[in-house]
Amino acid sequence: MSNESSKVLNFDDDYSLEAVPENSSERKSFWAMFVVMLGFTFFSASMSVGATMGNGLNLSGFVWAVIIGGVILGAYTGLLAYVGQATGFSMDLLAQRSFGTKGSYLPSAMISFTQIGWFGVGAAMFAYPVSELTGVNPWIFIILVGICMTSSAYFGMKGLTIVSFVSVPLITILGIISMVSATSESGGWIAMFAKSQGSITLPAAIGMVVGSFVSGGTATPNFVRFAKSKNIAVICTVVAFFIGNTLMFLFGAVGGAYTGRDDIFYVMIAQGFAIPAIIVLGANIWTTNDNALYSAGLGLSNITKIRKKPLTLVSGAIATLAAIWLYNNFISWLSFLNATLPPVGVILILDYFLHKENYSKDSAPTQTVNFWAVAGVVAGALVANFLPWGIASINAMVTATVLYLIGAALQKKAGANVR
């Protein structure tokens, strides 16, 4: 193979293994970044959370849970957005600095595994209800959406942007029209929430809001590193997460109250809007699945040192073929897996602000494994899953923070030059 051919094969405009240059033509404006991040938060599984909250809270409790949980989630993802844009690094390249070159394999493996799993679950979440509606074998739809969604994820940010610009307005407009109509038919918001069983406490509901997307939010740097400025990165992320999650919770709450099912898809079917329902469901899952597969490809790229594009194809194929198995078996693991990623994000944030000098685009990571960072993730995950009180993701982040800071203090005291 010639040197020129080798250079072509070793380059990708997703910057899998290097920072996005500040003057790159790939840098994106506010609206381009906003629709990508908003599409990322349009997550069908979040509707289930909304339906659960709608059945267990009154209207006031629902509103406060969404606001407080949204503030916590916005602060977390906003800080990650700042770090991602400031450095131009993906989550995995940031992890090379904070966890070490080999230590970064842990967060990369975690994000890849969870996002490949979610891609398969998402494909099945589209296939099953559409199959139920049309009578067509669900495997037909799984293969179709797997090919389409993998293809768009293959083209990286360009593909994500195009899909988001088409999908986000469709989901927003059609979903809101359906939701408003259903709410009106149900006697309004107060009447709808008056049916609540009141079985959920406010702290538990806040935990549900934060936990609904905190693991996905850890991948925020993968996307906003392409933003033209820090202000664009932070504002579009915080606003998108708040709006997107709020809409998903509302769609789910209305779905639960109006049809007893936790998806706006079933509301639209009940209203006689079959084609718009399929469009909204497909667009909703497509935006999230594209982002999931993109992050999985970057994570595997960090581990294998192979560029993202071929790994995206492999990941998409595995997730598509395993979609039904993942749907039936993977979701039960998500409560555990969702608690493993928030400690990663908080350590990335801490390490950046404590050691900014190690995050210049010209610097290279110097440590192999930061054992305190790895220990923080492991301990955080254990505390989140086994401590019976509090908010699991917050417990995980607090634990990781304490362990990381103890380690940093001990290293400094010992005069260890590990960077």
Image (spheres, rainbow, N blue to C red):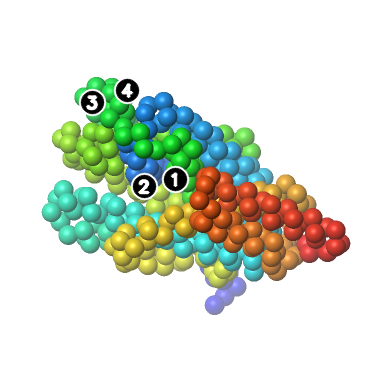
Q: Could you say which is closer to the camera, residue 280 or residue 79?
A: 79
Label 2 and label 3: CA atoms lie apart by 23 Å
Q: Residue 150 bears which disc, if any?
A: none
Identify the residue shown where x is 46% and y is 35%. 202
Regarding residue 29, the answer to whether it shows in the image is no
- Mark 1, residue position: 212
- Mark 2, residue position: 45
Callout 3 environment at 10 Å: few (<14), some (14 to 19), or many (20+)? some
Label 4 and label 1: CA atoms lie apart by 24 Å
- Mark 3, residue position: 186
Contact between labelled residues 2 and 1, with CB atoms less than 8 Å apart = yes
Give the farthest residue toward the bottom: 1
Callout 1 environment at 10 Å: few (<14), some (14 to 19), or many (20+)? many
Q: Nearer the viewer, mark 2 or mark 4?
A: 4
Identify the residue shown where x is 79% and y is 55%. 409
- Mark 4, residue position: 190
Label 1 and label 2: CA atoms lie apart by 8 Å
Q: Residue 219, image x and y in percent?
A: 53, 51
Q: Nearer the viewer, mark 4 or mark 1?
A: 4
- The amino acid marked with disc number 1 is Ser
Label 2 and label 4: CA atoms lie apart by 24 Å
Q: Could you say which is closer to the camera, residue 205 or residue 239?
A: 205
Element type where label 1 sits in the image: helix
Q: Nearer the viewer, mark 4 or mark 3?
A: 4
Identify the residue shown where x is 21% and y is 24%. 185
> Disc 2 or 3, which lies upstream in sequence?
2
